[in-house]
Image: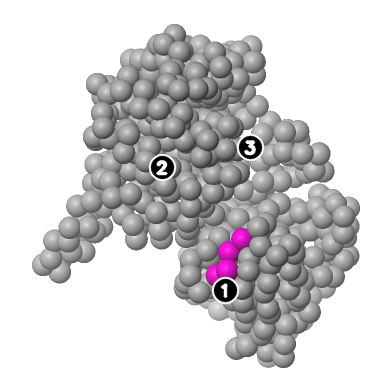
Amino acid sequence: MLRIKIFFAVFFCAGIISAKAQERLEAFQMNERLGRGINMGNSFEAPSETEWGNPWDPEYFKIMSELGFSHVRLPVRWEPADRSMANSPYTINPDFLDRIQEVVDTALSNGLHIIVNMHHHEALYEDPAGQKDRFLSQWDQVANHFKDYPDSLLFEVLNEPHGNLTPELWNEYFADALTVIRNTNPTRMVLLGTAEYGGLGGIVHLQIPDDEYLILSVHYYNPFNFTHQGADWVGSQSEDWLGTEWLDTEADREAVVSDFAFALEYSETNNIPLHVGEFGAYEEADLDSRSRWTTFLARWFEEQELSWAYWEFSAGFGIYDPITKQYLTPLVDALLNNEMPNPTPVQAIPVYASDFTGGTDGWVLQNGGSASSSLSASEGKLNVSITNGGTESWHVQLIKRNIPLEKDKMYRISFKAIANDSRSASFYAGRDSDPWDAYSGYNGISIPTNETAYSFAFTMTNPTDMNARLVFDFGTDTTGVSVTEIKVDELRILTTALDDVELQPRLNIYPNPFEVFLYCQDLNKFEYLEVYDLQGKLWRKSSIAPNDRVINLDKIPKGMYLLRLSGKSNQESFKIIKK
């Protein structure tokens, strides 16, 4: 069901039809049509079609369609000298434009929607003012060439704006490019990406043009140290990430929900559909983890009514081997066939919990470059006031030192934040000395004007560091921020396989089987109880009071369960049967 329908229902019931409810109806309908997609990556966005070893084959689009994909995203690098002129009139080579037309025609003939973008425009990122005329001229030519094509061809103005193409400039350049496109394509669907490399953190800076035919597109690769382990193009630290798993824990899912919370709110508030234009995990990650991560994201995106395009078809992240002509079946199933599984349950062991009632709790504010800021604590919150944000994100850093992180252990970091005005920031856990490694990867966040909860989970693949630091990067912006309830928890996987649990418990728990109540004289030796079914679904989780001797399980249906009792240093698990 389209989210737009919610608006109609609400206003109809109130007897009022709002003009806003009618905005971008066709965009929401198109986003539903896009559905499940995949990128034809490492082909036309390479410096030449063959340079990255993954040339396009017309057969690929037939395969995509037969598998069940609805659209393909086509990244295109228009900048190379053999593809377009660097100087006025910036003419695109007709042979190259015809080649792209052949690709578009092939997609359409196979029943696929296709998104054509501008990818890796490095000169524009480096020199926006000097390259703007060329950028707009190229879009004028592309738009004019395809002006008579059906609406199943979509345009995406620019992939991952960054560098000197700042968020403020991107708003201007996107609006100008859209004006050029609208001269010949007044109702063509156009995808709007975000600055700061296309991620969720760039949404807060967007100024959406007054246009009915827009879809917001973001990219998602969190946790980055999982999805890009062993990817040499991101730097030598990627080697340290090798072996990072994604276990689909409750905390892992909480992190995804936290990451997308602002984007979903923004989509609804601004009545603009949301497309995830890229998500994927590199081949150096273990296949089971890639499958778990991909399954959860694909199903969760669909639950949120988002369209998506996996990165990518037939290269390092891909689902198809062009040499052997074989599918990577676990990934194909993850994208198209798997149902949403139950999460892996975890136990949280506190490592650090902030307490700002008596001061800053050891947090310090560090200014670099020309930055100027101050730190205070009040009403249980840390308050950061910034008079000069400097020129780099790390020029204003809020830091907590001496956080113990042990190799191969999983951690969850959570906090709440609020800003005086919507802004972006980043957060990480890392080394407190050169080379300043980010153990958790860098997590970009959007902070709105209402207090919002955030959560990140990661595995410590680096050597144990008993003096790690937590860092918020608030530089380049003078908007003040308050943070509170900062927590670090170690996460331990809870085994729910009942075959490994003795039917007769070591403690005196009775009766078993039971009808409603279980009794245990030693229940007060533990702090928490959890009850799981055979599929790992959590039916009950509660704390144990000092005088508790009785467990009331009247709310769970009949069947076999795992009862887990846990304390600070002890844990017991038992089979129980409700009759």
Above or below for 101 versus 525: above
- Quickly name the residue at label 3: 281
How much space separates mark 1 and mark 3, taking CA atoms?
A: 35 Å
Pointer 1 local density, CA inside 10 Å: few below 14, some 14–19, many at least 20: some
* Dominant SS in magenta: loop
Looking at the image, residue 22 sits to the left or right of residue 199; the answer is left
- How did the renderer colour the structure? one colour
**Residues at marks 1 and 2 touching, judged by CB atoms closer than 8 Å:** no
Q: Which mark is residue 562?
A: none
- Quickly name the residue at label 2: 174
| Count of numbered marks | 3
Mark 2 or mark 3, whichever is nearer to me? 2
Dot 2 falls on a residue whose secondary structure is: helix
Looking at the image, residue 287 sits to the left or right of residue 4; the answer is right
Q: Where is residue 160 in the image (x, y as percent from the top left)?
A: 53, 40
How much space separates mark 2 and mark 3, taking CA atoms?
A: 29 Å
Mark 1 or mark 3, whichever is nearer to me? 1
Residue name at image x 24 percent, y 34 percent: 186
Three-letter amino acid code at disc 2?
Phe
Residue name at image x 28 percent, y 41 percent: 213
Three-letter amino acid code at disc 3?
Ala
1 or 2: tag closer to the N-terminus: 2
